[in-house]
Image (cartoon, grey):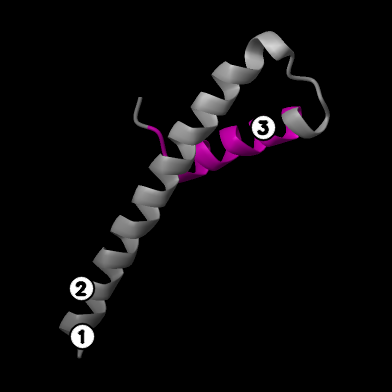
Amino acid sequence: MKLTYEQAMAELQGIVGGLESETIGMDELTEKVKRAAELLEYCKNKLHKTEQEVGRFLDKKN
């Protein structure tokens, strides 16, 4: 299954919520931080790609 931007953001919000509420135990912490870093990178790349595509579309319109 391909991850969508919305799914990545929802998972990130879940990780952040777990960190804020301290429901993530120490044993899980490293794993969750690594996963959050992966998700952040995915979202950053997705936003950059979308920005480029929109820019190309707008350039064609002008």
List x then y, in percent, for residue 2: 34, 31
Identify the mark nearer the N-term, 1 or 2.
Answer: 2
Residue 16 magenta? yes
Reading the image, the residue beneath label 2 is: 56
Residue 9 magenta? yes
Rendered position, 58 above or below 46: below
Reading the image, the residue beneath label 3 is: 14
Mark 1 vs mark 3: in front: 3
The residue under label 2 is which amino acid type? Arg
Reading the image, the residue beneath label 1 is: 61
Would you say the residues marked 1 and 3 are in contact, meaning their CB atoms lie under 8 Å apart? no
* Residue nearer the viewer, 54 or 12: 12
Residue depicted at x 51% and y 44%: 6
Q: CA distance from mark 1 to mark 3?
A: 39 Å
* Residue nearer the viewer, 8 or 27: 27
**What's drawn in magenta, residue-wise?**
3-18
Assign the magenta stretch its main secondary structure: helix
Image quadrant in which you'd find residue 60: bottom left
Q: Is residue 59 left or right of residue 45?
A: left
Determine whether the residue tagged by mark 1 lies in a helix, strand or loop.
helix
- The local crowd at label 3, few if under 14, some if 14 to 19, many if 20 or more residues have their Cα within 10 Å, is few
Quadrant of the image for the C terminus?
A: bottom left
The residue under label 1 is which amino acid type? Lys
Residue depicted at x 41% and y 50%: 44
Mark 1 vs mark 2: in front: 2
Would you say the residues marked 1 and 2 are in contact, meaning their CB atoms lie under 8 Å apart? no
